[in-house]
Amino acid sequence: MSTNYKPIDCNYYDLLEAAATQRRRVDLQYFNDLRQLCLGSGVIETLFIRDKVEYMRLKSGEEIRLDHLIRLDDQPAPGYADYPDFSCAC
């Protein structure tokens, strides 16, 4: 996984903004900084930029790079449409 930031699609950013504005719990799949696949859920507190990289901060305080995001709920991020969905529908 490249350490260079790749800006995300504007339409996908709009989905993130809507979820943050509605303060609704979302399911997330993403890569952490160690390139490990992470599954989780939370409420997006804010979207912000640090050192020219876009992030989301969850209410828990966790920060996720937007270009490491694979899926928000059932919406795959652009570039990850063919990536398997590892969420459990149990």
Image: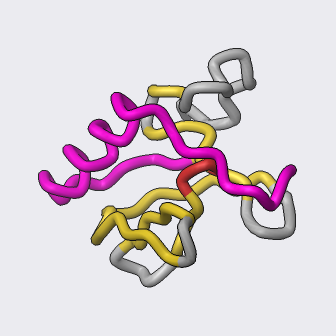
Q: Position of residue 40 (x, y in %)?
A: 55, 57
Q: Quadrant of residue 80?
A: top right
Q: Residue at x 49, y 65 (%)?
A: 55
| Nearest the eye: 84 or 57 | 57
Assess whether residue 10 is covered by the magenta stretch.
yes
In the image, residue 33 sits, relative to residue 59, either above or below, namely above
Q: Please name the residue shown 77% across and 69% down the image.
A: 33
Q: Is residue 66 positioned above or below 70 on the image? A: below
| Magenta stretch contains residue 9 | yes
Q: Nearer the viewer, residue 2 or 89?
A: 2
The picture places residue 17, in percent across and down from the top left corner, at 25, 49
x and y percentages locating residue 28 in the rendered image:
52, 49
Q: Position of residue 23 (x, y in %)?
A: 18, 59
Instruction: Tell whether 46 sits left or right of 1.
Output: left
Residue at point 37% right, 34% down? 10
**Residue in the picture at 55% in, 34% down:** 90
Magenta region, residue range = 1-28
| 33 on left or right of 5 | right
Q: Residue furthest top?
A: 82
Q: From this viewpoint, which residue is outermost toward the bottom?
A: 61
The image quadrant of residue 88 is top right
Residue 66 placement, left or right of 20: right
Q: How is the image coloured?
A: secondary structure
Q: How many marks?
A: 0
Q: Residue furthest front?
A: 52
